[in-house]
Image: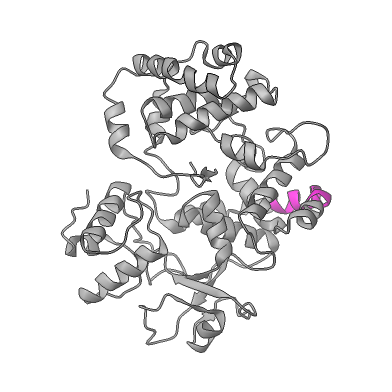
Amino acid sequence: MILRALHVVAVVAATLAWPAVASAQNKSSSVDFQTFVRSLWPEAQAKGITRATFDQAFAGLSADQRVINAIHRQPEYGRPVGVYVNGIASAANIANGKKKAVEWKQTFDAVERQFGVDRWVLLSIWGMETSYGAMKDKWDVFRSLGTLAAIRFRDPYFRKETVIALKIMQDDRVPRAQMVSSWAGAMGQTQFMPTNVIDYAIDFNKDGKIDIWNSVPDVLGSTGNYLHKQKWVMGLPWGFEVLVPPGFDYRKSRASFADWSKLGVRRADGAAYPARGDGILFFPSGAKGPGFIVTENFAVLKEYNNSDAYAIAVGHLADRIRGAAPFKTAWPADDVQLPRDARVTLQKKLAALGYKVNEFDAHIDFDLRDNIRAEQVKFGMLPDGHPTAALLDKLGIPVR
């Protein structure tokens, strides 16, 4: 879902603050929630929210412990990347995606013409988020957002999103019963956070209302509009699996497509590189697993949800729906992704060693992977940029 605004991210979409969560679990959720609601009213009123709307939104609500618990269970983390990716690019998701491509062909044609966004990626996001609309939102958006805001999770992000959700219900005259979401407040068939609804949701079928819950044209048009405004490049792949030659220098991570070809790095599917552009090489499960060269469109997918695993899964499902083959290289059976707290500790360690770290949010971006390569070289390890428990051990970081 889009948590980055959070980016999104987005998109819960997805930067986590563990201390706030831990402290919140030791408080009385009902008292905290009502205190939050009372404190929110002046902000909501200043944004034009009426008392009637405000009271209707929060009537009878209390904090939801399930939301707090869900923070610890992000599907992109805590299990091998290959398991996650293969679970998304399942036979059922591929088959259903092909059916939806035929069923909504005219809509996809129109979205591609207007926004220049690949239909297969739209299909994949739709399938990823709600199984092409089959999975319905079931969480009360004001209870979910209010709970996260009450525990000051990523404060003030969820507090602001709560006020925006109030505006959506009031200004767009969305029935209170329709204000449902994911556990983290993402709404509709492709999971827009309230800010994204305001910024990107459109009435694509021209029926006079925006409905990202029930109108497939509005869902696809809104998602196309989002990706377009995030600078999606039509005709450019998100990335592709590659095979590196014997003796390859794993310290190399960035080059033009032409230079990658000269270095002997070839596409696993045998296709040619794009005619122009640059790509970043990375190994989400280390050098023993599949390697990828990703493009600027990969960064766009991470704007939708700031997770490498998510972006690979969306890209791969899109390719499989389009008819591409599975990855050539098997995912390693012993792949263990670092837990979130270990990633944050690694970021802090790298910062202490003098590397630039923009946020201590557990997301290992490509700059940090290059820093990891430098540390791996120091320890005589293969510099594939993949953070492992073995590296943390050498850095003096315990992994629980």
Asked whether 53 or 28 is in front, the reply is: 53
Work out which quarter of the rendered image holds the N terminus and state it.
Answer: top right
Magenta stretch, residue numbers: 97-107
Residue 388 in percent (x, y) is at 29, 62
Q: Would you say residue 125 is visible in this rendering?
A: yes
Q: Name the colouring of the figure.
A: one colour
Is 400 drawn above or below residue 292 in the view shown? above
The extreme front residue here reads 46
Is 14 drawn above or below residue 159 in the view shown? below
Q: Residue at x 19, y 56 (%)?
A: 397
Residue 231 in percent (x, y) is at 63, 59
Q: Magenta stretch: residue 102 in it?
A: yes
- Figure disc tally: 0
Residue 264 in percent (x, y) is at 49, 87
Asked whether 292 or 290 is in front, the reply is: 292
Q: Residue at x 25, y 61 (%)?
A: 350
Q: Residue at x 55, y 49 (%)?
A: 304
Q: Residue at x 75, y 52 (%)?
A: 101
The dominant secondary structure in magenta is helix
Q: Magenta stretch: residue 55 in it?
A: no
29 relative to 222 in the view: left or right: left
Asked whether 240 or 43 is in front, the reply is: 43
Q: Would you say residue 11 is visible in this rendering?
A: no
Residue 24 in percent (x, y) is at 31, 27
257 relative to 245 in the view: left or right: right
